[in-house]
Image (cartoon, grey):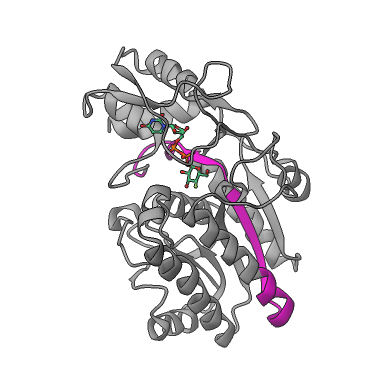
């Protein structure tokens, strides 16, 4: 019995593959390598280079590998790009997932762990954010993930699909011991951009907005170590394997840090005083996003281990300077 990881050559997907192997699962990766990296998949793990919309290949893979559960990361995930190329996001994310779910159904595969996002909440009015809060995404990326959550719910009711949807806050950090880490092109995320600046690969880091209603005026986010995220997928699979009902969980460290605080901590850890520039707000950024992860802590006994800002930055710095 195999776990199929779609998007397993991507950042969070490849760290989840590591965690699945560590916990004794048989794994196959399915990735079209449009943004993922072949080098991020261990040599002894089968890598099928194909698109989730390719039902012939997918059917063959689900049958040949006797896939029991799918961990579904494959998606387009740039918020800014989603606003200018919505068709790409509806095609890859919504239509791609529909195709995947229908193929799974045909092949009798009934378990899915789905990669969702805090972007489904939009601009929340209170913190910490619980799963019951209003779902009002402010960008196309978040809307596609919310549509998929609805699709999962409907498939569960009609066709006995069982799923766990994980709403990630800000994934960061890299695998201890190196080998894999965050490598997007273009890079848009705060922590890798800060560390690339410290490393001299960028002239400065821009702070997008210093007039937010927060203590120091910069945006506050909940950074969660990618290995802690990965571990939650393994717990979600265990829940499903034990016959567990469909669930939706937030995944965050439950602690917020401002952009300014992350920069200060990065300066301390790297010992480098890199240039910082105050810039205009980036459109669509909520002031504060901090999770309540009480539900997954209580129900699946998930415990973040690596998610202090210190450990996140240290592991990401090892990766950056590898
Ligand atoms: N930021 C800067 N300068 C930069 C880059 C980012 O100040 O050069 C700021 C952003 O304005 C934001 C914070 O740093 O306040 C974090 O930005 P990221 O781009 O790293 O992450 P986001 O919070 O925008 O996005 C994350 C995930 C998305 C997800 C979103 C949910 O990466 O996939 O949370 O809101 F959709």
Q: Position of residue 202 (x, y in %)?
A: 23, 28
Name which residue lies at 52% across and 76% down: 98
- Establish if 184 lies above or below 107: above
Q: Residue at 36% across / 60% down in the picture?
A: 85
> Count the marks: how many?
0
Residue 76 is one of the magenta-drawn residues = no
Classify residue 154 by image quadrant: bottom right
118 or 110: nearer the viewer: 118
Q: Position of residue 121 (x, y in %)?
A: 62, 48
Q: Quadrant of the C terminus?
A: top left
Q: Is residue 29 visible?
A: no
Q: Nearer the viewer, residue 139 or 132?
A: 139
Q: Quadrant of ligand 1?
A: top left
Would you say residue 159 sits in the magenta stretch? yes
As displayed, is residue 149 above or below residue 229? below
Residue 283 point in image, percent of width and height: 43, 39
Horizontally, residue 229 falls left or right of residue 80, namely: right
Taking the image as shown, residue 316 lies to the left or right of residue 157, namely: left
Query: Image check: 187 left or right of 112?
Result: left
Q: Nearer the viewer, residue 322 or 203?
A: 203
> In the figure, is residue 245 to the left or right of 66?
right
Is residue 117 in view? yes
Residue under the point 55% across and 85% down? 107
For residue 36, what is the image quadrant?
bottom left
Quarter-of-image position of residue 52: bottom left
Residue at horizontal 51 percent and vertical 82 percent from the top: 103
Quadrant assignment for the N terminus: bottom right
Q: Is residue 57 above or below residue 247?
A: below
* Residue 130 image point, x, y percent: 72, 43
Residue extent of the magenta highlight: 153-180
């Amino acid at each position: 019995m195999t776990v199929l990881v779609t998007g397993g050559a991507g950042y969070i997907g490849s760290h989840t593959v590591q965690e699945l192997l560590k916990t004794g699962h048989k794994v196959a990766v399915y990735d079209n390598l449009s943004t993922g990296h072949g080098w991020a998949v261990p040599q002894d793990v089968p890598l099928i280079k194909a698109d989730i919309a390719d039902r012939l290949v997918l059917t063959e893979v689900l049958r040949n590998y006797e896939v029991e559960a799918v961990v579904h990361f494959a998606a387009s995930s740039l918020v800014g790009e989603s606003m200018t190329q919505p068709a790409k996001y509806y095609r890859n994310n919504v239509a791609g997932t529909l195709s995947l779910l229908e193929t799974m159904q045909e092949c009798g595969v009934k378990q899915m762990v789905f990669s969702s996002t805090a972007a489904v909440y939009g601009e929340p009015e209170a913190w910490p954010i619980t799963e019951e809060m209003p779902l009002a995404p402010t960008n196309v990326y978040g809307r596609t993930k919310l549509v998929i959550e609805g699709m999962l719910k409907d498939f569960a009711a009609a066709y006995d699909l069982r799923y766990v949807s994980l709403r990630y806050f800000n994934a960061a950090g890299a695998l201890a011991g190196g080998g894999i880490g965050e490598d997007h092109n273009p890079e848009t995320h705060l922590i890798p951009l800060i560390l690339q600046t410290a490393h001299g690969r960028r002239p400065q880091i821009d702070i997008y907005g210093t007039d937010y209603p927060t203590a120091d005026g910069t945006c506050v986010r909940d950074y969660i170590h990618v290995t802690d995220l990965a571990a939650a997928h393994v717990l979600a699979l265990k829940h499903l394997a034990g016959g567990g009902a469909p669930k939706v969980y937030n995944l965050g460290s439950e602690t917020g840090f401002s952009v300014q605080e992350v920069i200060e901590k990065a300066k301390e850890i790297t010992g480098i005083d890199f240039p910082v520039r105050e810039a205009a707000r980036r459109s669509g950024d909520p002031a504060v996003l901090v999770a309540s992860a009480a539900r997954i802590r209580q129900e699946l006994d998930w415990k973040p281990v690596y998610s202090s800002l210190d450990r996140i930055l240290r592991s990401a710095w090892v990766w950056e300077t590898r």
